[in-house]
Image (tube, rainbow, N blue to C red):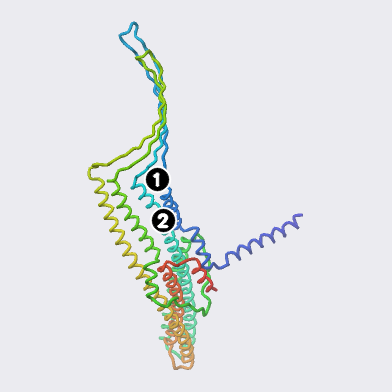
Amino acid sequence: MRRIARPVALAIALALAAGLTAARAAAADLEQVYRDALAYDAALASARASREAGLEKLPQGRALLLPSLSVTGNTTWNDLTLKHLNPDVSRGYNSNGWQAQLTQPLFRWQNWVQYKQGELQSTLSEAQYQLARQDLTLRAAQAYFDVLTAQDTLAAARALYEANTQQLALARKSFEVGTVTITDVHEAQSRGDLSSAQVIAAESDLAVKRHALLVLTGKEADTLKGLRKGVALSRPEPADIQAWVSAAEGSNLSVQAAQIAGEIAGREVERNRAGHLPTVDVVASYGNSATANALANFINTDIRSAVVALQVNVPVFQGGAVNSRVREAAALRDKASADLDNARRNSAQNARQAYLGVTSGLAQVKAFEAAQVSSASALDANKLGYDVGVRINIDVLNAQSQLYDTRQKLAKARYDTLMAQLKLKASAGTLGEDDIKAINALLD
């Protein structure tokens, strides 16, 4: 049985190991990173808890309009001694009572205003949460593209190092046969050392970018899916910068939150002014009081009472506190108005910047694609010229550096353009999961 069990156990272990290896080898995509960030990011978790707290402002405000019921009770032990009697009389007795009171506000304008504020505060908490979620979308995409950029930079640095190493070997061989000078060898050695330092720097930067992604998602991604070769990036729709600016000024989530905050601040002025108004309540109470009368030979009394009353309270003077609170609320209302103007201006500026980032990014991508073709042709021509003796070693080294630098800049221009597209949608308040899915469809 042992001879049979061991091969089976080994097969199972190998299968599990293969499965784990395949799981580790599977490349993560942008949508997966986004969903991991939704579940792990601490800033979004904080915003989610803040939203839950803000939603409670509505039932708290509603409670001010509804009746309140309270029940109180008391019990007291009394030890009484009557002097100047013959003999003195001492007796202990208990007095107790209870009362239930129901209060229904009829007119409390400040409570009604606070209830409307609770509705607005619930809406504001939801808008702030959506703003935090939109910010997470941008942070997740930026972290993803930062890793891809670092990977491309490292790949270009390694390829350049390999090409410079080969060119150094060729220069040394040519020097040995006397076809080039020692200067060519030194130049190739210098470029090789420089590219080696660039590889080290690129490896360090990639480690930093991967850790930033780990902090955001809580998961290590060994490999990430990159853009497909030759993928075409779309232009903004509509292709009108003013349309995006107008949308940002009206629909940006920061603008919406500032508008709601302004309404809350305006109602706060009204609520504090209501401190000058009278209040009217209906009060109903029912209770019982039981005690002993020591002066009437300790005769127990049991009193039950039921009262329904209309209670009016007219504030006359409160030391100027109400007027002070009104002035404070008016100043905060002016602040909220200025914050709204600032939010609109910033959102308009962000929309312009993002739109130009998309359009200029598309132009850069097209230019770098053309430059990549010409740089590759230039490198081939310089290598051929070097072989036939019409080009020197430094020409080949420069052409190699230019080609790999162009490739790296092309990749970065594509990532920056995609990020500008997301920022443009965010400025207009329309960024959502569908935009993540659309970019995810461009990955290989």
- Element under disc 2: helix
Going by the numbered disc 2, the residue's amino acid type is Ser
Residue 266: x %, y % from top left: 31, 55
| Relative depth, front residue between 234 and 299 | 299
SS for callout 1: loop
Q: Quadrant of the C terminus?
A: bottom right
Q: Residue sitting at 37 percent across and 63 percent down? A: 255
State if disc 1 and disc 2 touch (CB < 8 Å): no
x and y, in percent, of residue 61 in the image: 40, 48
Quadrant of the rendered structure where residue 406 is?
Answer: bottom left
What type is the residue that disc 1 sits on? Leu
Residue 330 drawn at (x, y percent): 27, 54
The correct choice, above or below, for 346 with respect to 40 in the image is below
List the residue tagged with mark 1: 65
Q: Residue at x 53, y 73 (%)?
A: 443
The residue labelled by disc 2 is 125
Q: Residue at x 37, y 42 (%)?
A: 105
Position above or below: 363 against 327:
below
On residue 147, the disc is none
Q: Which residue is farthest right?
A: 1
Q: Is residue 371 above or below residue 97?
A: below
User: 409 or 55: nearer the eye?
Assistant: 55
Q: What is the spatial separation of the Cα atoms under label 2 and label 1, in whole angstroms?
A: 22 Å
Which of 229 and 128 lies nearest the eye of the viewer?
A: 128
Q: Position of residue 362 (x, y in %)?
A: 44, 79
**How many numbered tags mark residues here?**
2
